[in-house]
Amino acid sequence: MSKSERILLSHITVRGPDLESIHQVVKDRKSASFDFLANLFAMPEAGGSGVQVHQLRECLNFLETVGIIKANKSTKGEEFVLEPNLPDVAFPLILLNRLKLSAENSFYLVHKHLVSNDVLSVDMGALKRTVESSLELGFTWNEQKLGFWMNLADYLGLGKKYAYSQIFVCFPSSELLKNLLTVTVSKRKSGERVNLGEFVNYLSTEFFECLTREGLLFKGLQQSLLVLQRKGRISLVPAASDDPNPTFVDGKRIGFVSLKGG
């Protein structure tokens, strides 16, 4: 992967909902030209003499870089189509999947660093210091890049950005986890419960980091599972006494996650 492809955090003006809207149009139409997308999404220039396409171009470049769309160029201009074999899930999960599968990108590596160090919350200053001292990616970190990271991570459900204090609380949202549990149950046709160890391995392979080290769940993920249980949306089922590979949540041996309505 080239340096330019790794610096996803340079797309500082890109926002998750914009990416989602563009993806939905291309998906619904099977393909969409740049001019068509510009008519939908580009803002008029001052004075009404044309449209501002820079923001649209940034979004399209980002979607191409992570492997969600591709541009076919011809004498008629650019025509955008979806890359084949994208997972049939909600767009934030598609984007998480692409970021995980291209695991050398700067967005993923920042998240991996926070999880591996069991960081539950971090402000902008501390985030800048820790990535500068720990991640050698060959470019300069600044608050604009890291602010973009916080915004996109919030949109994806990897945590919550508190804009006024510039603090990021690092835990997967209840909705993200419930959606992923539902997808897992559906794909594996496993009734209404999921082996927690297998689920964690699935998340770590396809979507985002879950472990601080081998077999030890990130504290933020543990908290999110406990929140879902308190809300009555899942039940954490204790592991059998002879289970050789239990997963620990809040110090308790857990074997399965049982889904409930809600």
Image (cartoon, rainbow, N blue to C red):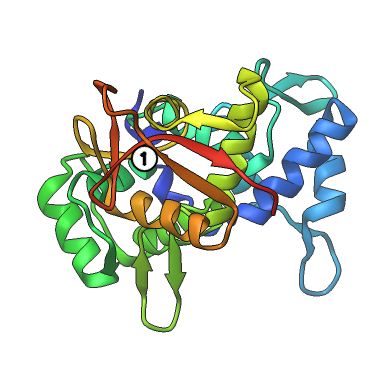
Q: Which quadrant does the C terminus fall into?
A: bottom right
- Residue at the image position 13 percent from the left and 47 percent from the top: 134
- Outermost residue, left side: 133
Q: Is mark 1 on a helix, strand or loop?
A: helix
Residue 186 image position (x, y, % from top left): 67, 26
Would you say 147 lies left or right of 230 here? Answer: left
- Regarding residue 14, the answer to whether it shows in the image is no
- Residue at the image position 36 percent from the left and 67 percent from the top: 168
- Outermost residue, bottom side: 164
- Residue at the image position 29 percent from the left and 47 percent from the top: 110
- Outermost residue, front side: 241
Q: Which quadrant does the N terminus fall into?
A: top left
- Classify 10 Å Cα crowding around label 1: few (below 14), some (14-19), many (20 and above): many
Residue 57 placement: quadrant? top right
Q: In this view, does 44 lie above or below 253?
A: below
Would you say 128 lies left or right of 18 here? Answer: left
Residue 32 image position (x, y, % from top left): 84, 32
Question: Closer to the camera, 49 or 40?
Answer: 40
Number of marks in the image?
Answer: 1
Question: Closer to the camera, 112 or 40?
Answer: 112
Q: Is residue 168 above or below residue 110?
A: below
Residue 15 image position (x, y, % from top left): 59, 57
Residue 212 placement: quadrant? top left
Residue 128 image position (x, y, % from top left): 22, 62
- Regarding residue 32, the answer to whether it shows in the image is yes
Question: Closer to the camera, 132 or 4?
Answer: 132
Q: Is residue 199 above or below residue 162?
A: above
Q: Which amino acid does label 1 sit on?
A: Tyr
Q: Mark 1 points at which residue?
A: 108
